[in-house]
Image (cartoon, rainbow, N blue to C red):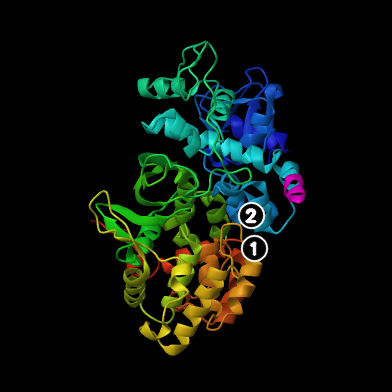
Amino acid sequence: MHTDTESCVRAVRSKDARFDGWFFTAVRTTGIYCRPSCPAVPPKSENMTFHPSAAAAQQAGYRACKRCRPDATPGSPQWNERADLTARAMRLIADGVVDREGVPGLAARLGYSTRQIERQLHAELGAGPLALARAQRAQTARLLIETSELPMADIAFAAGFASIRAFNETVREVFALAPTDLRSRAGRGRTGARPGARTDVRTGPARDGAPGRDRPAPRPGAGLPGPGSAPAPAPATLTLRLPHRAPLHPDNLFGHLAATAVPGVEEWRDGAYRRTLRLPYGHGIVTLRPGPGHITCRLSLTDPRDLTGAISRCRRLLDLDADPVAVDELLRADPVLAPLVDKAPGRRVPRTVDAAEFAVRAVLGQQVSTAAARTHAARLVRAHGDPVDDPQGGGLTHLFPAPEALAGLDPEKLALPRSRRTTLTTLVAALASGDLALDPGSDWRSARERLAALPGFGPWTVETIAMRALGDPDAFLPTDLGLRRAAAACDLPATPAALTARAAAWRPWRAYAVQYLWATDDHPVNHMPTG
C-alpha cells in the first residue's frame, strides 16, 4: 500500500487507525516516522514519504514519533493472511527466529537461500531480515524499559541485542532517547525528554577515563545464546497492553478457549484466560483479559529473553493482527451472513500458542465431545507434561507435553480406540523427527499434504489444524457437524459439497465465516464465561 501515495495521504489526513501497521509515514522536515493515526497535526503532503515497515523507515534515517509510538502498532494483517515467502518470513521473525538462530536459521526453516530471502524482503519491505529483527528488538527493549524494573544490562540481552553498545546505539537511534531517559520519561508520565543528557547503559564504571565496555553475548549465528549456553537473566513478570484493530468481539474468542481448556495447562479465572507457555529459553504463564480497545496481558517468564516470542504467540492466539473491517465487509455482501456480522462484528478466529500441541489435541478430539477431548488431553498432561509452579496461586500445574516427550509413549496405555492410537503415535513421531513442521513459517499447502498423508487424518482434522494451528484465514470445515447444523438453520446448503460451493464467495475469509455460523448455536464456545 505504501506505493499508493494518494491513498496513504488520505489515510493520514483522516487519522484512520485501520491502516496502522499497513504503512508508516515519514516526515522529511522533522526526521520522524509515525503511524497513520498519529494525533499530531498532519504534515504537508509534499513532506511525507511512506514506508512499508518500521525497519525501512529506520534505515532511511527516521526516528519513531514519541507521541503516536509507531513501534507499538498492531502488526500488518498481511502476514497472517498470506502464505508466500515474505509472509512466512515475517511470522518467523515475529516469533524471534532471527534473534535465536540468525538469518541462516531463518533460511533453513523456509527452505530458501539467505540471498533469496534478503532479496525478497528488501523488494517488498525495504529492509532485510536483520533490519526487521532489529526494529523488533528495539520495540521489545522499549517495552521492558518502560514496564519493568529489570536492570538495563538484562534488558539488552532479553530484547535480543548482542551487546550493551548495540542496545544503546539502537535505542538512541530509533527513539532519540537514551535507555534511562526512556525509563525516566515513562515514570514521569510526560512526553518530553531532557535534551542533551547522555545516559547510555554501561556494564560497569569506566576505568582510567575510558568508556564502559560492552559485555559480549556468545551466540550461535547472529542470534542470542542458545538455551543453557549462558547465564539467563532473572525471571520477569510484566503487564502490558496488546493493541488490535477495532472492532473485536471477544465472546467466541475467549469462550472457545475457556470451553476447551485443558486442566492444568489452561483455565478461566477471575474474568481472564490463563495458560502455561513452552518457550525457547524456558517457560511462562500468561493471563489475557479483554479490555476497552486492547487486551491486557500479564506475562510471568522464567527467562525474559522469551518476551518477544511470548507476545507474538499471544497475538497469534487471539488473532489480534486481523483486519476485521476487511473481513466483515466481504462477509456482509452475503445476505445470509450480513445479519450475523451486524449483530456482533469483529469476530476473530481462536488460534493457538503451540501448533504441535493443537495438532495433538485435534486428534484427541476426533469424533468425541468437547468434554471428552479435555479429559483425554488432561490424562496426557498428567502423565507426560512438565510440572510448573503458578506464581498467582491458580490451577496451572503443567506444560503441555512436547512431541519428543510423547514420541515414546506406550499406545496401549491410551484410553482411545486402536485406530486413533495409531493416528496419535504417527503424528507425534512425525513432529518429533521434524518430518512434519507446523511452525509459524510453515507452508500451508505443504503442511496440509503432509497431514493428509498420515493415517486417520481426514478433511475435518486437516482443516481444523489449518484454521487454528497454521492460521490460514481461508480454512473451511464443510464436514463439521456444528457448521452443517448452523448452515441448515440459516437455509444454506447442508451437504459438504454444496456448502463448499456456496462458500466460494466468502474467500479468502472462510475461517471467519465459520465463526459467525458457529455463533448461531447456543454452545459454551460462543459465550465468554462470566466468572
Residue range of the region highlighted in magenta in the rendering? 114-119
Q: Magenta segment, principal secondary structure?
A: helix
Q: Is residue 423 above or below residue 15?
A: below
List the residue tagged with mark 1. Answer: 443
Kind of residue at badge 1: Asp
Question: Could one spot residue 337 in this view of the protein?
Answer: no
- Of the pair 2 and 503, the residue shown nearer to us: 2
User: Is the N terminus in the top left, top right, bottom left or bottom right quadrant?
Assistant: top right
Q: Amino acid at mark 2?
A: Arg
**In front: 17, or 244?**
244
Circle 2 Cα neighbour tier, 10 Å, few/some/many (<14 / 14–19 / ≥20):
many
Estimate the spatial distance between the alpha carbons at disc 2 and disc 1, rounded to whole Å: 7 Å
Task: Describe the element under mark 2 as helix, strand or loop.
Answer: helix
Residue at image position (49%, 70%) is: 359
- SS of the residue at dot 1? loop
Give the number of the disc on residue 88: 2
Horizontal side, residue 376 vs residue 1: left or right? left
Residue 186: x and y, percent?
40, 24
Q: Are marks 2 and 1 in contact (CB under 8 Å)?
A: yes
In the image, taking residue 14 as reference, residue 227 lies left or right, namely: left
